[in-house]
Image (cartoon, helix red, strand yellow):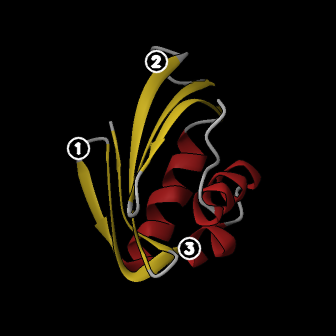
Amino acid sequence: MTTKLPAVVTAYLAADKAQDLDKLCQCFTNDAQVHDESRQYQGHDSIRTWKKQTAAKYDYTVEPIDVAVTERNIKLHARLTGNFPGSPAELRYTFVLANGKIQSLAIH
């Protein structure tokens, strides 16, 4: 992968890997939305609960494969490997940024 990720996406991936919920939540706007596993989460409290539940359920690593970056949108193609059904799996993360933070994240 040769395209450089925006700083906030790099910070999100590092916080996710470290399972640092405080740093992860700091990557998002106050009213941010996350869509993952057919569920919607909005706001820091909801996003914190989502990541806490995910970390309790799965142990995984994220390996970026490819990225497409525009002014506000980042489409990250990544391989997740871990203790979940279908591992390894390739997922697509769609980040929408606002004022240097993540306004929305969809994981498919």
67 to the left or right of 96: right
- Residues at marks 1 and 2, CA–CA distance in whole angstroms: 16 Å
Q: Position of residue 14 (x, y in %)?
A: 72, 54
Q: Position of residue 57 (x, y in %)?
A: 54, 41
CB atoms at circles 1 and 3 under 8 Å apart?
A: no
Q: Which residue is mark 3?
A: 25
| Mark toward the start of the polypeptide (1 vs 3) | 3
Extreme bottom residue here?
A: 30
Q: Which residue is mark 1?
A: 38
Three-letter amino acid code of the residue under disc 1: Ser
Three-letter amino acid code of the residue under disc 2: Pro
2 to the left or right of 73: right
Three-letter amino acid code of the residue under disc 3: Cys
61 to the left or right of 56: right
CB atoms at circles 3 and 2 under 8 Å apart?
A: no
Secondary structure under tag 1 reads loop
Secondary structure under tag 2 reads loop
In the displayed structure, 29 sits above or below 21; it is: below
| Mark toward the start of the polypeptide (1 vs 2) | 1
| Foreground residue among 52 and 95 | 95
Q: Nearer the viewer, mark 3 or mark 2?
A: 3
Say how many tags the image has.
3
Q: Quadrant of residue 7?
A: bottom right
Q: Quadrant of the N terminus?
A: top right
Residue located at (40% from left, 34% from top): 92
Secondary structure under tag 3 reads helix
Q: Position of residue 47 (x, y in %)?
A: 44, 68
- Residues at marks 1 and 3, CA–CA distance in whole angstroms: 20 Å
| Mark toward the start of the polypeptide (3 vs 2) | 3
Q: Which residue is mark 2?
A: 85
Residue located at (76% from left, 54% from top): 18
Q: Residues within 10 Å of mark 1 (few under 14, many from 20)?
A: few
